[in-house]
Image (cartoon, rainbow, N blue to C red):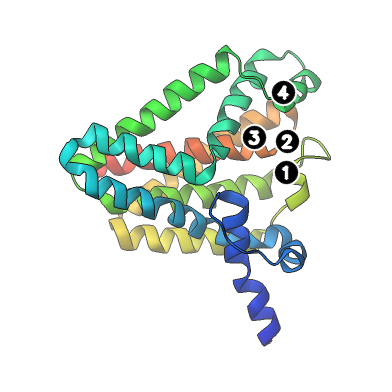
């Protein structure tokens, strides 16, 4: 039976998820967050929703300026809300996976704060495609699709974290731990239920697309560095988000 203290521990996962995945000024109980560790990953879709909501408000208010401008402002809000955390992972993975010839060298590049040609191209293409997908959704007023993709991509990220071993002992991912599969399933079910509520059965198709994209990143990371890092998780989120957005745009 779940005690009152257990319930408080579980609901403390929500601010813990916000503290980890966003730059929102939330107050986190450090002891409870550490005790829960990666079990808080079920709440990651809620962090995605929290990132999407202010972006949707900005997009709705600026829609009269045209879909491209509104989408650009929405993307800016989401990047600021996350501190560019996931986009940074995409750039670092692009530099490392294609700039290094051995797993050890790729891990070194992942730790390097500088950005190279591969990372620059990945950011331009990745963010550019997300921008255009958002513009298409703004044009047809499919606001719920933006929130759905944000939640589904965070759930997919948790799946990658559970599926892959750590590529190195240190780093953000290792400090959080690996979520058990019941946590991943709970987060996935939560994200899917909310996505379907917002977008209908298109949300189910988008969930499959997000999962496929995250799986592709996971398989690439397994081949290139033998596992996951925080950057790999960030890249998985961006690619899952893009896949979900494009799917929802195609079905809008």
SS at circle 3 = helix
Mark 2 sits on what residue? 227
Q: Nearer the viewer, mark 3 or mark 2?
A: 3
User: Does residue 252 sit above or below 196 in this rendering?
Assistant: above
Distance from the alpha carbon under mark 4 to that under mark 3: 11 Å
Q: What residue appears at the point 50 percent right and 22 percent down from the top-left corner? A: 122
Mark 1 sits on what residue? 172
User: Does residue 178 sit above or below 135 in this rendering?
Assistant: below
Q: Residue furthest left?
A: 64
Distance from the alpha carbon under mark 1 to that under mark 3: 9 Å
Q: Nearer the viewer, mark 1 or mark 2?
A: 1
Residue 177 visible in the picture: no
Query: Which label's residue is closer to the chain start, 4 or 3?
Result: 4
- Residue 50 at x, y percent in the picture: 45, 57
Q: Nearer the viewer, residue 222 or 142?
A: 142
Q: Nearer the viewer, mark 4 or mark 3?
A: 4
Query: Which label's residue is closer to the chain start, 1 or 2?
Result: 1
Image quarter of the N terminus: bottom right
Side of 87 relative to 227 (left or right)? left
Mark 3 sits on what residue? 231
Distance from the alpha carbon under mark 1 to that under mark 2: 14 Å
User: Does residue 195 sit above or below 234 in this rendering?
Assistant: below
Mark 4 sits on what residue? 112
Do the numbered discs 1 and 2 sit on residues whose CB atoms are within 8 Å?
Answer: no
What is the quadrant of residue 167 in the picture? top right
Q: Nearer the viewer, residue 97 or 163?
A: 97
């Amino acid at each position: 039976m779940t005690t009152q203290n257990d319930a408080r521990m579980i609901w403390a996962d929500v601010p813990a998820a916000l503290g980890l995945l966003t730059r929102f000024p939330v107050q986190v109980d450090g002891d409870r967050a550490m005790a829960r560790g990666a079990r808080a990953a079920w709440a990651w879709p809620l962090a995605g929703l929290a990132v999407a909501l202010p972006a949707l408000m900005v997009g709705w208010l600026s829609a009269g300026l045209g879909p491209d401008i509104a989408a650009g402002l929405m993307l800016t809000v989401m990047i600021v809300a996350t501190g560019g955390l996931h986009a940074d992972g995409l750039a670092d993975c692009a530099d490392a996976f294609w700039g290094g010839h051995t797993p050890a060298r790729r891990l070194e590049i992942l730790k390097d704060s500088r950005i190279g040609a591969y990372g620059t191209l990945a950011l331009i293409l990745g963010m550019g495609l997300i921008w255009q997908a958002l513009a298409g959704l703004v044009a047809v007023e499919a606001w719920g699709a933006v929130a759905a993709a944000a939640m589904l991509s965070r759930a997919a990220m948790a799946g990658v974290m559970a599926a892959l071993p750590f590529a190195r002992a240190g780093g953000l991912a290792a400090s959080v731990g690996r979520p058990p599969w019941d946590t991943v399933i709970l987060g996935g079910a939560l994200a899917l239920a909310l996505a379907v509520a917002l977008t209908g059965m298109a949300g189910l198709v988008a969930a499959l697309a997000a999962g496929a994209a995250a799986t592709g990143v996971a398989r690439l990371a397994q081949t290139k560095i033998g596992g996951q890092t925080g950057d790999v998780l960030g890249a998985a989120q961006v690619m899952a988000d893009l896949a979900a957005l494009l799917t929802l745009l195609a079905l809008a």
